Amino acid sequence: MREELGVRAGARDTPTVLEVKGVRKAFGATQALDDVSFELHRGSIHALLGGNGSGKSTLIKLIAGVEPADAGRLTLRGSGEDLRGMTPARAREAGLHFVHQQRTTFPELTVTENLAIGRGFDTGAGGRIEWRRAQRRAAEVLERFRIDADPRQPLAELGPAKQTMVAIARALQDQADASEGVLLLDEPTASLPAPEVKLLLDALRGYADAGQAIVYVTHRLEEVFAIADRATLLRDGRVVATVEPRSLDHEQLVELMMGRTVEQIERLRGRPEGRTILEARAIGAGPVTNLDLGIRAGEIVGLGGLIGSGRSTVLKALFGAVPLESGEVRVDGELRPVHSPPAAMAAGLAYVPEDRQKDAAFPELSVGENLSLTVVPDYWHRGVLNRRRERRDALGLFDSFLITAASEEAPLRSLSGGNQQKVVLARWLRRAPRILLLDEPTQGVDVGARAEIYELVHRAVAAGAAALVASSDFEELARLCDRVIVLRKGAAVAELTGEGLDADRIARVANAEVKV
Amino acid sequence: MSAPRKSLRQYFEAYAFLGLLIAAAVFFSVWPETGETFTSAANLRTLISSNSVIAIVALAALVPLVCYEFDLSVGAIAGLSSVFVATALAAGTAVPLAIALGIGLGVLVGGINALLITRVGVNAVITTLGVSIILAGVVNQKTSGLSVTGSIPLGFSEFGSSNWLGVPKIAYVLAVLALLVYYLLGHTPYGRYLYAFGSNREAARLVGVRTKLTLGLTFVISGALCGAAGVLQVARAGSADPKVGETFTLPALAAAFLSTAAIKPGRYNVAGTLVAIFFLAVLNNGLNLAGSPEYVSNYVNGAALIVGVGLAVRLGRRQEV
């Protein structure tokens, strides 16, 4: 990936634009940030890298003035700000531009409207919007930020990477000079599929080469290698090191980030083949037509394909989350109706959805409640809900599913992304399902949690279950799965296994009919 | 990690509102302006019995609210029930039958609400608003706008105005119903599903919660509670005022909302609802006795709702890490 993105301009000797010093922040007894400092140079990309709960998001919030810091100073082009009294308005005045992880653009509105919102429209007599002028301005901005789009196009028609670029352009449009302000990006690629990530990273590199200073928050190592000139590694709220990623290799960076060596999980290829557990014949749903699937005990099968290929729909239809329009599903040889999630659960299926926040998390409920929602009736005995047993089981699950949380009573939203994902996985695995349906099982989690999630999936299938995994991350499919079925426009076009199974081949098969 | 211990701040957040209720009660007891009347047995009993009916309506509003759905028809259903129960009693219907009629009507209207919301897919606010307007029409047609004051059996109205161990009997009914709702919400799988549903509807569906049934039932339960409240209103007043139902809706909803600021902060809950009802009741009663004009209580009630829920939201946000 490094070569693909070209060689970076050196940034070591350019002047310092932003200096952040001695930032501290505690939430109750937890020290979220402890004396964190870093420096950002002109025309460079500085990565803030860390696992879940390392404090990187908190740091951005403090700099943005969304939350008050306990201590810390920020110096931007010579003028200082006390972070204890930072407000979003002051951050904006100082020239700090943020693009947050959550979508802040409006897909139904046009590119012009999206660019004008937050900045204000040019208005004529009577407050009428001067559309022609706005259109012309938008065209200029698109040109300046090298975004190939029509100002009159609804934003939703652009790809996800371009949408993020529009958000960036919106933040930076009023900067007269690229070296004037600072752009801070909080995990901008979190919800982008792989090809889109490259598009965005290329654009960012271009902006930096034009002199823009960029702070880039991420937990994805590949991206750090791809674009960052320097990286500050955070762990447990402390700066572990500030490095030049080019001088390190992957393993060293992981070690620094996690504070331990990550054991590579050996893929158990060529496992003894078990009985067929899940058999789907000629199923159809949404884009998926006439698909056959057979998965054996102990097997992890991947579903690869581009967005719209139907890989998520297959899982949803098997779980009854969307209607199965045709075909039949057998579990352990027996015909089972899967018209609704409860029916699918009764048939032994479990489903971890793609979008955790939208479809799986109960943020205000406690971790314990989140863990037990799939098995509540088990605790219901003679008219009493056995809370004590529920609590004890939750703590047991913390151990067996490697979940780190302050307590069983803490709200789920207080956990890091990786721990939330492990809670969702544990919620299903505790039912000892026959078939585990996983959609993007490691989306938005760091390398450490990712390895742990793989381990949990391996453990489940070793105990006799079968897993069907859909992912846009072809590396992940190649690493986790015994074989991968590649979908194109809702039909299986290839099955890769053994030596033929690698990320490149999945990508090539998946892309075959798509113009590049 | 094992024993869940609460910090001092959490205790404060949970019980501050209850403290305010006690403080208000103590204040009006010792303030010379109100002390004598406020602490009189007659005043306290009226305060408790009249607010017990509203509290039951508030519990009715609470159940759908846990799912983040508003039932605006709670007062109207209670009013409907009271008018029909009073008419039936005046016409000589046996008391148990009349009680069943009141609760049955509540279940019926709640069921209609449930079907419209879950099957037809009409938004709950619109459904229950529409239904409450229609019910006002039904009540008007039935009573021609006049109170139903026929001969209510003596035993029935006596129940509504007499005490047991010095406390109005109606308060015991409230206690039983409150315990039932508390049990339902906190100690049954169904209650757990309601909170899950309120937190994330789609996620609830995807962990196997039967969403339509779950949501629909909340309106049926709400209707049944409102029906019961209507029956008690007749027992308490000895008659049925066709306008009384409407006056229940807003205070009941306000208390249900405010419950998120007490006892279990951030969660709509039974104990918090009761605290809110009686906090507002004591405040209004005290101000009333002090001779303040009626509009003052409007100011107080409205401000209490906004401040209470606003604080709860802020506290909830601060706990996020």
Image (cartoon, coloured by chain):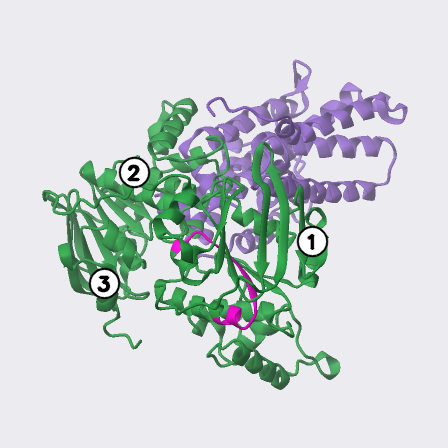
Chain colours: A green, B purple
Residue A219 is one of the magenta-drawn residues: yes
Instruction: Identify the residue position indicated by label 1 in the image.
Output: A87
> What amino acid type is highlighted by mark number 2?
Leu
**Residue B167's spot in the image, x, y percent?**
67, 18
Above or below, A391 relative to A33: above
Mark 1 vs mark 2, foreground winner is 1
Mark 1 element type: loop
Give me the C-alpha separation between circle 3 and circle 1. 47 Å
Kindly state the secondary structure of the residue where label 2 is placed. helix
Q: Nearer the viewer, residue B34 or A312?
A: A312
In 3D space, how far apart are the residues under numbered discs 3 and 2 (Cα atoms)?
A: 28 Å
Q: Which mark is residue A429?
A: 2
Residue type indicated by callout 3: Ile
Answer above or below: position of A285 versus A443. Answer: below
Instruction: Please tell me whether residue A13 is drawn above or below residue B127 in the rendered image.
Output: below
Tell me which label, 3 or 2, sits earlier in the chain.
2
For the magenta stretch, what is the residue range?
A: A206-221
Identify which residue is drawn at 62% across, 41% down.
A24
What is the three-letter code of the residue carrying label 1?
Answer: Thr
| Relative horizontal placement of residue B142, taking residue B115 as reference (left or right) | right
The mark closer to the camera, 3 or 2, is: 3
Residue A35: x %, y % from top left: 60, 42
- The answer to whether marks 1 and 2 sit on the same chain is yes
Q: Which residue is mark 3?
A: A506
**Residue A384 shows up from this direction:** no
